[in-house]
Amino acid sequence: MNDILFMLADGTAAPVGGSNPLVMIVFMVVFIAFFYFVVIRPQNKKKKEMEIMMNNLKKGDKVVTIGGIMGKVSSVKDNTVVVKVCDNSEITFEKQAIARVVLPQNKNTKIEKKDDKKSIEGRNSSAVDSDNSGSEDGSDGKEESKS
C-alpha cells in the first residue's frame, strides 16, 4: 500500500497521449471551409441578387414589400420607391423594404394547364367507364330499363 502512495507522490505519471497538432489544423480548415460554403457564400449571393433587383426597379413593376403590401411602382428615386397600392393611394418605401418583384405570368402557361386538366379529366372518366364494365355482380354496368 505504501508503495502505491510513493509512486503517486513521485510525480512520474504515464505520458498522456497527445494528438498531432496537424490534425487540429486540418480540422479547423475543413470547418472554416464548410462554414464558408454553407453560410457565407449563399448569403453573399442573395445579397447581390437583392442589390440587382433594387437597382433594376422601374415604373410599372409589381412588387411585394417586406410587410406584405402589394402594388405597382409609380416612381423610383435614389433610396425610395413610391408604390401605388390602389387607385387613390401611394405609399413611399425605402428600396430595402421591397421584398420581391412579382413576375408576370405567361398566358400560354395558363392555357397549357387548362388543357392538362381536360386531358386528366378525360382519362379519369374513361377509367370510371372501364371500372363499371366489369362489376362484381356480373352485369355489364348498365342499368336495364323496365318498360
Image: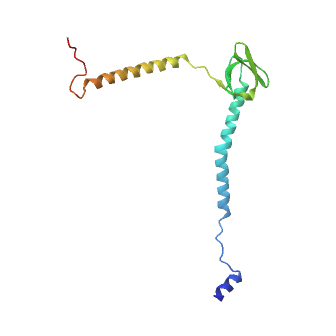
Q: Residue furthest top?
A: 147
Q: How is the image coloured?
A: rainbow
Residue 11 drawn above or below residue 43: below
Closest to the observer, 97 or 55: 97
The location of residue 38, given as percent across then percent down, is 64, 44
Q: Residue furthest front?
A: 147
Identify the residue at horizontal 49%, vertical 17% (top origin).
Answer: 111
Quadrant assignment for the N terminus: bottom right
Residue 88 drawn above or below residue 67: above
The reply, left or right, for residue 20 in relation to residue 145 is right
Residue 131 drawn above or below residue 16: above
The location of residue 145, given as percent across then percent down, is 22, 14
Identify the residue at horizontal 30%, vertical 22% (top origin).
Answer: 129
The location of residue 65, given as percent across then percent down, is 69, 26
Quadrant assignment for the C terminus: top left
Identify the residue at horizontal 67%, vertical 85% (top origin).
Answer: 5
Task: Report the number of discs.
Answer: 0
Occupied quadrant, residue 6? bottom right
The reply, left or right, for residue 123 in relation to residue 98 is left
The location of residue 77, given as percent across then percent down, is 78, 21
The reply, left or right, for residue 130 in relation to residue 8 is left
Closest to the observer, 65 or 46: 65
Occupied quadrant, residue 21? bottom right
The reply, left or right, for residue 89 in relation to residue 112 is right
Closest to the observer, 57 or 117: 117
Identify the residue at horizontal 60%, vertical 19% (top origin).
Answer: 104
